[in-house]
Image: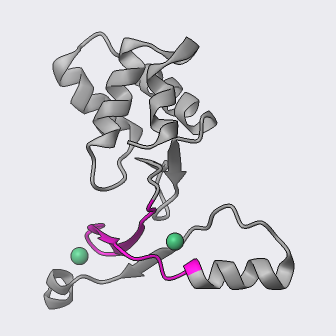
Amino acid sequence: MNKTEHKVYQGKRKSKKRQLVYETLAKKELPVTAEEIFMEIALKDDKISLSTVYRALEAFMADGIVQKTMIGESSNGLFEVRANEHKHYLMCVECKKMLAIKDCPLQDYENQLEKTTKFKIKSHQLQVYGVCEKCQKN
Ligand SMILES: [Zn+2]
Ligand SMILES: [Zn+2]
């Protein structure tokens, strides 16, 4: 739990449904679509709607606690909790399987960029595509 995560549970943004959306998302190891979150919550609470899930995700993004990643060509975006230790993903272009890459290879590069450009680097995106072992055999 970092400081920003607590923001969800406090103040005017507090709502049971949003909390549910957040908790469902926080349990995920890999980024998921809004539809996946909706389906999972709908199994437990049929009163939730997909637009509620979208609104909650948008509020979380505005708070900077959730980030949206565009992966693949036809993707509507995948959501994940913004962790202190951010992750990158390796994705199989055939079966769309994703693997989290533990270490960020760009940390040193960012530091170097800050020095040379005088930018204060805020974030970056890196998505690696490939063909997984299983798909290589097919
Ligand atoms: Zn594959
Ligand atoms: Zn990184």
Residue at 49% x, 48% y is 76
Closer to the camera in the image, 9 or 95: 9
Residue 123 visible: yes
- Residue 106 is one of the magenta-drawn residues: yes
Q: Which residues are magenta?
A: 85-107
Quadrant placement of the C terminus: bottom left
Residue at 42% x, 26% y is 53
| Residue 61 rendering spot, x and y as whole percentages | 57, 38
| Residue 128 rendering spot, x and y as whole percentages | 44, 78
Residue 49 visible: no
- Residue 43 is one of the magenta-drawn residues: no
Q: How many marks on residues?
A: 0
Closer to the camera in the image, 30 or 74: 30
* 60 relative to 100, above or below: above
Closer to the camera in the image, 39 or 19: 19
Residue at 61% x, 67% y is 124
Residue 23 occupies quadrant: top left
| Residue 99 rendering spot, x and y as whole percentages | 29, 70
* 125 relative to 60, above or below: below
Asked if residue 44 lies left or right of residue 86, the reply is left
Residue 12 occupies quadrant: top right
Asked if residue 112 lies left or right of residue 133, the reply is right
* 14 relative to 43, above or below: above
Residue furthest to the right in view is 118
